[in-house]
Amino acid sequence: MLVTYIRSSSFNNYSCCQMQYFITYVLGHQSVSGKKAQLGTVVHKVMEVLAGCQHLQQDNKKMLLADDALGDIKFTRKKLKSEDFVEDILKQSYDWYTSNCTHKYTKSDYKFCQDLTKEAITYNNGLFDPRNRKIVAAEPHFDIEIEEDWAKYDYEMPDGQKITGNLAIKGTIDLVTEVEDGIIEVVDWKTGRRIDWATGEEKTYEKLCSDPQLLLYNYAISKLFPDYEQAIMTIFFIRDGGPFSMCFDKKDQEKFLEMLKLRFQQISRNQEPKPMSYSRNHWKCNKLCHFYKNNWEGTDQNMCIHIEEHLKKHGMDETVKKCTAKGFSVGHYEAPG
């Protein structure tokens, strides 16, 4: 398969279902987020706005936050600290995201978002409330090239175009704060359950210490903010266990590069991506997967099976050529925030 970048989500996605990875990251077809995931996005937006406003006011900048979804948000120091401000941002976020998707929502869904937001900002006397933190960066995006010999790629696209370069890691970190001089803390909000979707197992502290997402973030932070000597990585499961914090060192960065190298090789050598279940009887296929629940355009065959059969009949190159989403190119893709 063609692979020019890896995100934390794509790293784990490949472990769960190679076919879903192929359809999403190589062919460029996007799935629709589930209802719970969409509600989680609402809460993430509230935390992002609070952090962004706190960042502006701590640096004595104009108290006007330009948000990509909610527009211009005016505030004062007093207003930022108020419960009414949080509620107003929550309502704006909820209205914006729920009006731009196909799911049906009820009052209980709004209450769900209220409860998650309250839990996040009141936990341990507001320890993780962005308004009580020194903000280094709110929702920083990263696109970091891996400068290793093994990370080089050289592909010829089905249309004859050649693309060369080095593998990159891309993504967005929820929040980066300064704990004290020389020490920063990365906070990643999780509104879902504390389980590994590839295995179905609970994510214990020991497993989180080897979690690809946290190791990827730790590596990214070392490149984005090299002046800090130490980074604390905190993953906060708002409704399933609270915060889990850990510190990584340079050996962990080396460990991550080895994990990344292995995943890069696995993906790039794979010419026959496998579905999670050939029978599609697994509940993750028929209950969660967008590509199983939706048909390929102009056919009565679901997208997953259509792509699988096309691969068997025509091979990788022809499938990439014929089945890639309009306007998508794996060689020039800019990963979203």
Image (spheres, grey):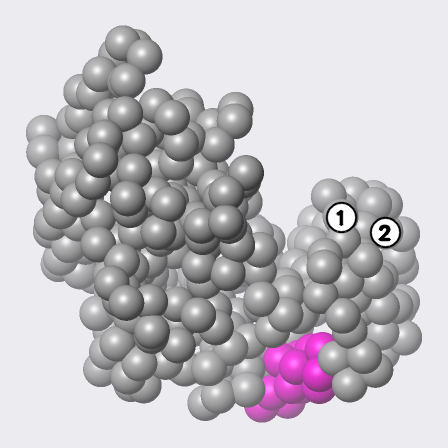
Residue appearing at x 33%, y 58% in the figure: 13
Gap between marks 1 and 2, in whole Å? 11 Å
Q: Which amino acid, mark 2?
A: Ile
Callout 2: helix, strand or loop? strand
Residue in the foreground of this view, choosing between 178 and 268: 268
Disc sitting over residue 325 in the figure: none
Q: Residue furthest top?
A: 160
Q: Which residue is mark 2?
A: 73
Residue 170, position in %: x, y?
39, 42
Q: Which residue is mark 1?
A: 69
Q: Which residues are magenta?
A: 110-125
Vertical relation: 77 (above or below) 8: below
For label 1, the crowd category at 10 Å Cα-Cα, with few meaning under 14, some 14 to 19 and many 20 or more, is: few
Residue appearing at x 17%, y 44% in the figure: 272
Vertical relation: 304 (above or below) 94: above
Q: Residue furthest front?
A: 300
| Quadrant hosting residue 291 | bottom left
* Left-right relation of 320 to 47: left
Q: Quadrant of the N terminus?
A: top left
* Left-right relation of 224 to 88: left
* Left-right relation of 316 to 22: left
| Quadrant hosting residue 81 | bottom right
Q: Is 278 in the magenta?
A: no
Residue appearing at x 27%, y 58% in the figure: 275
For label 2, the crowd category at 10 Å Cα-Cα, with few meaning under 14, some 14 to 19 and many 20 or more, is: few
Q: Is 114 in the magenta?
A: yes
User: Is residue 333 visible to the viewer in this orientation of the structure?
Assistant: no
Residue in the foreground of this view, choosing between 200 and 283: 283
Q: Which amino acid, mark 1?
A: Ala
Residue 329, position in %: x, y?
41, 25
Residue appearing at x 30%, y 51% in the figure: 19
